[in-house]
Image (tube, rainbow, N blue to C red):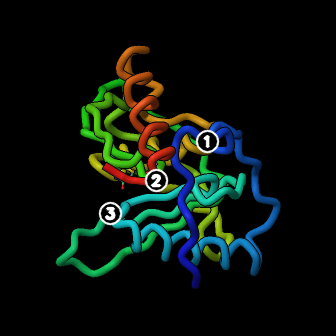
Amino acid sequence: MTVKTILTEPNKLLRQISAPVQKVGKEERRLMDDMLETMYSANGIGLAAIQIGVPKRIIVMDISKDNEKKTPMYFVNPVIKHHDKLKATYEEGCLSVPNQFAEIDRPSKCEVEYLDYDGNKKTLKAEGLLATCIQHEMDHLEGILFIDYLSKLKKSMIIKKLSKNKSNRIVV
Ligand code: GNR
Ligand code: NI
């Protein structure tokens, strides 16, 4: 398994729409292993393939707490079948938008259909942080970042900060 570099905003690749996977084979499993390793090493709870520059509809997640057993989850070609009308608010962050956080409203529950690590079709009913995280990751597959839900002013301030940090080669 290899730790890959996580792309950060502003980066055009993060805006690309990811393509469905034809088959969950060796190459896809290797990608999922690398994604999980990369996510753990960055202390994230989720990662979409595009965040390491691969435009495939693949997500890995692990929302277990530090003192709990690791529970990696793999989602290939995820589709949201239902989502709740009721919204929930979470303070979100993103490994591709380093050190920036904002409260985002999303449907509080959702049902997702996907292929698992072995290519088997599964459905999962999610709520709480799991539901929020799945929706955050699925946005990445469409080239959407959580800052896109903020006001133009807040969003542009964040992008400005990130660009500055990039040109200085420092992370604040
Ligand atoms: O590590 C992450 N934490 C997080 C917290 C609240 C809502 C969403 C997330 S996902 C984020 C990792 C990431 O950027 N995934 O794309
Ligand atoms: Ni993210």
- Badge 3 element: loop
Q: Earlier in the sequence, mark 1 or mark 3?
A: 1
Is the shortest distance between ligand 2 and the CB of mark 1 under 8 Å? no
137 left or right, relative to 116: left
In which quadrant is the N terminus drawn?
bottom right
Distance from disc 3 to disc 2, alpha carbons, whole Å, reads 30 Å
Res. 169 mark: 2
Check the image and name the residue furthest to the right: 22
Check the image and name the residue furthest to the top: 152
Give the mark count. Answer: 3
The location of residue 58, given as percent across then percent down, is: 63, 58
Q: Earlier in the sequence, mark 3 or mark 2?
A: 3
94 left or right, relative to 141: left
In front of the other: 126 or 137: 137
- Res 70 → quadrant: bottom left
Distance from disc 2 to disc 1, alpha carbons, whole Å, reads 15 Å
Res. 11 mark: 1
The location of residue 107, given as percent across then percent down, is: 37, 32
Check the image and name the residue furthest to the left: 67
Res. 63 mark: 3
Please name which of the two marks, 2 or 1, marks the residue nearer to the observer: 2
Q: Earlier in the sequence, mark 2 or mark 1?
A: 1
Answer yes or no: is residue 111 visible: no
Distance from disc 1 to disc 3, alpha carbons, whole Å, reads 26 Å
Asked if 40 appears above or below 122 in the picture, the reply is below
Mark 1, residues whose alpha carbon is within 10 Å: few (<14), some, or many (≥20)? few
Three-letter residue code for mark 1: Asn
58 left or right, relative to 130: right
Identity of the residue drawn at 75% across and 81% down: 26
Asked if 129 appears above or below 116 in the picture, the reply is above
The location of residue 109, given as percent across then percent down, is: 35, 40
Identity of the residue drawn at 35% across and 21% down: 154
